[in-house]
Image (spheres, coloured by chain):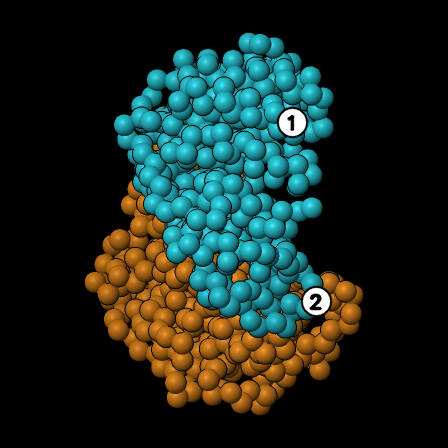
Chain colours: A cyan, B orange
Amino acid sequence: MPQSFSFQIQTRCTHTHARAGVFVTPHGIVETPRFMPVGTLANVKTLTPAQLLDTGAQMVLSNTYHLHLQPGEKIVAAAGGIHKFMGWNGPILTDSGGFQVFSLSEMRTVTEAGVRFRSPHDGAIIELSPERSIEIQNQLGADVIMAFDECPPYPASREDVVAATARTVRWLERCIAAHDRPEAALFGIVQGGVYPDLRVAAAKKLVEFDLPGYAIGGVSVGEPTDLMEMVVRVTTPILPDHKPRYLMGIGTYREMAQAIASGIDLFDCVIPTRLARHGAALVAGERWNLKNAQFREDFRPLDPSCPCYTCQNFSRAYISHLVRAKELLAYTLLSIHNVTELIRFTTRIRDAILGDRFTDEFAQYLQVQS
Amino acid sequence: MPQSFSFQIQTRCTHTHARAGVFVTPHGIVETPRFMPVGTLANVKTLTPAQLLDTGAQMVLSNTYHLHLQPGEKIVAAAGGIHKFMGWNGPILTDSGGFQVFSLSEMRTVTEAGVRFRSPHDGAIIELSPERSIEIQNQLGADVIMAFDECPPYPASREDVVAATARTVRWLERCIAAHDRPEAALFGIVQGGVYPDLRVAAAKKLVEFDLPGYAIGGVSVGEPTDLMEMVVRVTTPILPDHKPRYLMGIGTYREMAQAIASGIDLFDCVIPTRLARHGAALVAGERWNLKNAQFREDFRPLDPSCPCYTCQNFSRAYISHLVRAKELLAYTLLSIHNVTELIRFTTRIRDAILGDRFTDEFAQYLQVQS
């Protein structure tokens, strides 16, 4: 692990693989397990950094693919790096662009060298490769950067997944060779689709590189939840115990609790801010549509037990009014609550692990689906 | 003036009619002259009350017309009034709906009784009258409420303006009779179009009612700036010296400075938040379109001398990026700056009046246009 990074496990759950830890980065600590809000375009949608800090956010994710297209990594670098650019002084993780290239871009050509695709902004040909992704991420200047991977869709044939997983390993070697910035920790990404043996083999291969952290990618791409949970259960134990483990793109209550029980430390998902922009709140494990008539004259806070600014100051009726009136403030207030809610779910699990009450308090999320 | 209200003049400019004062309301003080941000639908667009407080806002305006249509005054009253509903504990002023009925609604019928129009939401017939407007405003629960007036368009014939002005005076009598809430101060509105003698006559008539404050309405309806300034110059001296004076709908630098020189204390305008939503910043008296290429790599704050959260934390390049990416945070950051900027313009004038430097420091705004 680079000098300015460390990961200490504070407490382990006596019944599961769950652990409470502290991941130290050059921009501060991340107390794990923890949900990371997504700031795709160098901002967590509708939230100022001050509001984001109040949600309990520690590490924030941003996207290489999106920032490369707009405003471009040169502008971010000229601003003094992504922390200074977006006004977030805490830890930042950038995704490599691999996932977006394979899920968002059109007319792409994949070769061993890398991926060519057309910019959705101006149609220009753009090339991303392991070296280019690392170069862009180093210009952005995040604390944690991700390896450039090939993320197969779901469903994909075993043959295609074998090829993508092998390429991801070869690309990882090139990422490691291209990475030379000690202020950033490069995490590898385990692929392998829904094939448990491929996941295990890929994880074993990646562990040989002794990286400062590992992610499980290629989940949340359309596969059934039980397959995703199986992938996490078989893959996580292979990853080194003393390194942070990050499950990419996951952010529902049950999936996070299950993954934490398997030994996962970090999560990210766009769901809290996306739901907010659709006028929905995450409350008590449910999704509430604030446009519903039942909220028009409901003067209670969204969640009376929630410490967030929204719940401390506004009623369901007020937020319902703002949503109906399409006032942008609605999306800010709902984002504050939803991001707080998911982070709080993971910090409540963390507290439970520290007190060895995880399986008692979160039993409802921990049954394995039959 | 109702018991819980007072208006003290602290200092007068020795060269103009400008004065620095303190208007005391049940929800706090308003140091005048001061710009009031507009929270049409019980929120100043894109700003939380915490962000609004940081702009220097004291009194905030909201709109009876809009709130009657959505969510309806009953819901606001059931929430405990508009302060509690929107989470703003400072002074609030509600407009009567008169201006909006005449400028926004279609298929309206005006009689001596009041105005009938179709709801733009559901097409239902809605009636507003002096009594109804006061009843709604009292349910909303603002500190300052406005008389229901007939606001003639520009241009309008002298005959039409005479009729509207006379009706506004008759409607004022009915507003006074309908108003029975000592926690609210009812302000009268001087109409009279661009006819100085009609303005003077209307002002004299209104003064007879000894109201706690007076507004000049029916400006900023399309008339040339010099006519508006003339109206303010001839009308303001007629209004009682020891009562707050409010120029409705005005919020440009020059117009505010000129009006303050005539003895105006309060202003409101949607311009700072509307410009923000169009990606524009108010800086040094100019309007900057943040989409312009010149800002892409400009890493200075919008205004290095501005104390607002936006200028203290973000660059023009970052805001330009957010505007180009259509990120909603752009509108929040620009609203924070633009509202701060207009309030700060009036508090700088206030400070200058207190130090008797108004005509020196704001000379550029005070020449009368030829």
Report the front residue among A210 and B180: A210
Residue A138 lies, in percent from the top left, at 39, 23
Examine the image and state in which quarter residue A213 appears.
top left
Return the chain for callout 2. Answer: A
- x, y (%) of residue A35? 48, 45
Q: Quadrant of residue B24?
A: bottom left
- Residue A130 on image: x %, y %: 49, 16
Give the image quarter of residue A135.
top left
- Residue B169 visible (yes or no): no
Q: Which residue is found at the position 53% from the left and 67% from the top? A: A301
Q: Nearer the viewer, residue A350 or B294?
A: A350
Farthest residue, direction left: B355
Judging by the rendered image, the residue that carries numbered circle 2 is A293
> The residue marked by circle 1 belongs to what chain?
A
* Residue type (three-letter) at the residue carrying disc 1: Tyr
Q: Disc 1 and disc 2: Cα gap in Å?
A: 45 Å
Residue at 65% from the left image edge and 81% from the top image edge = B132
* Residue B11 appears in the rendering: yes
- Helix, strand or loop for disc 2: helix
Q: Name the residue under label 1.
A: A195
- Residue B251 is left or right of residue A9, and the answer is right
Figure label count:
2
Which circle, 1 or 2, is nearer the viewer? 1
- What's the residue at 58%, 52% (across, down)? A365
